Amino acid sequence: MSVRDLFKVIDDMRYELVDLTREFIQIPTINPPGERYEEMAGLIARRLNESGFSAQLVRVPDELLRGLKLELPRVNVVGILRGSGGGHALCYNGHYDVVPPGSGWSVEPFSGVVRDGKIYGRGAADMKGANAAMIVAVKALKEAGFKLKGDVVYVATPDEETGGHAGAEYVVKEGLVKGDACVVGEPTEVDKIAVAHKGALWLELTTQGKAAHGSLPHRGINAVEKMAKVIVALEKLKADLVRRETKAPMPEESRTPTMMIGGLIQGGVKINVVPDRCTVTIDRRLIPEEDVEQVKNEIQDFIEKLKSEDPELRVNLRVLEKASPAYTREDEEIVKAVRDAIKKVTGREAIISGLTGFTDMRFFNQVMPTILYGPGSMSQAHVADEHVSVEDLVTGTKVYALAMLEFLGYEE
Ligand SMILES: [Zn+2]
């Protein structure tokens, strides 16, 4: 069997690939709140078992769900396909949750309708298509007669769209995922590998004042005016950020940290009452060289300094979300394996880049070199009429299969 035979097998499996993608889309795993997860996890486990994996469902304990304020069950799937021995282990991760469909669709968002060579539906690109492509890639390798030396570890996780705490973070923390490298199938487009993404620190600042009658404002402390001073002062921190440039291959417009203030702002109760409380959110994005705790301390220290200059200033800082940035060096073996596969399948040099948003890559990257690669485009994520082309799915499947051969080794 040759690589050419493998490609032929995958071309012949395109209907199976389309059907599996549609089957995944047709279970609306909408998150929030996290609907139909048990059904979806069960289906993925069945399809994995049919492809030769031994798959198990990993339920997140109720106690943890309560802590995360989640009401519906969270189920992860971990499948292992044992190789003949002597090779590396390669993990593959796909999240199976999708964001709510929103409005503006010209097709039913969970029908998985195929039109002009494209599969439409919420999750088609982000990222049920990639989940299907990976399963079909393993099946195709078997049908083409290749026996992998190393193990394939498939991890399907929920909740990526809401932070991944009961999904990827849980399986990694519990030590359920082990391997020498991991590919997360987010839609990077078929000739692009993302080796990095930014992190995020989401904060809520609250100033505390003292209420008073609007006609006698000097008797109170105006929490909104205090917040205005804090916001203006933070401009100084912002100005410092543009001088920090990442060495990771991030897109041109995303090479420095950013701080966005006021995504949400709240204060005051009535036109003639001095506001005693004002709340503002901060969305601080981190380059891979930064650390979430350090960045939090930097903002905290800055606020403490403002407080020392104004004895009336009372500010509280609350962390809403922490997401570490991630970066895998381009000389890692997994980057080479996927890069070579892209070259062989598409005939083009792979583009190595990074994502501005954060993904589950950050959890897997803590225990093994991790990259993002998947069919479909990030521009299709979360939009109306989300779709992925069948051609891209086929190409992605070939790249996955070839990367497995190179990274895991094989016997014919
Ligand atoms: Zn995604």
Image (spheres, helix red, strand yellow):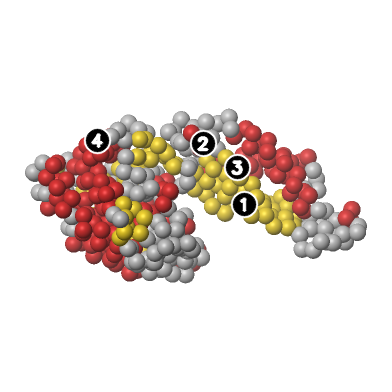
Structural distance between the alpha carbons of marks 3 and 2: 14 Å
Q: Amino acid type of disc 4?
A: Gly
Q: Position of residue 76 (x, y in %)?
A: 34, 61
Q: Is residue 171 visible?
A: no
Q: Which residue is mark 4?
A: 347
The verdict on label 2 being within 8 Å of ligand 1 is no
Mark 2 residue element: helix
Instruction: Tell us which disc is closer to us: 1 or 4.
Output: 4
Q: Where does label 3 land, which residue?
A: 259
Label 4, label 3: how many angstroms apart (C-alpha)? 40 Å
Amino acid type at mark 2? Glu
Which element type, helix, strand or loop, lies under badge 3? strand
Q: Earlier in the sequence, mark 2 or mark 1?
A: 2
Q: Could you tell me if the residues under marks 4 and 3 are in contact, i.e. CB atoms within 8 Å?
A: no
- Residue behind mark 1: 263
- Looking at the picture, does residue 292 appear above or below residue 383? above
Three-letter code for the amino acid on which mark 3 is drawn = Met
Q: How far across and how far down the image is residue 387, in percent?
A: 36, 55
Image quadrant where one finds the N terminus = top left
Discs 2, 1 touching: Cβ within 8 Å: no
Which residue is found at the position 35% from the left and 33% from the top?
A: 330
The amino acid on which the numbered mark 1 sits, given as a three-letter code, is: Gly
Evaluate whether residue 230 shows in this view: yes
Point out the frontmost of discs 2 and 1. 2
| First in residue order: circle 3 vs circle 2 | 2
In this rendering, is residue 145 above or below 121? above
> Between 336 and 153, which is closer to the camera in this rendering?
336
Marks 3, 2: nearer the viewer? 2
Instruction: Return the disc, 2 or 4, that comes first in the chain's sequence.
Output: 2
**Front in this rendered view, residue 176 or 374:** 374
Q: CA distance from mark 2 to mark 1?
A: 20 Å
User: In the rendered image, which residue does mark 2 sit on?
Assistant: 253
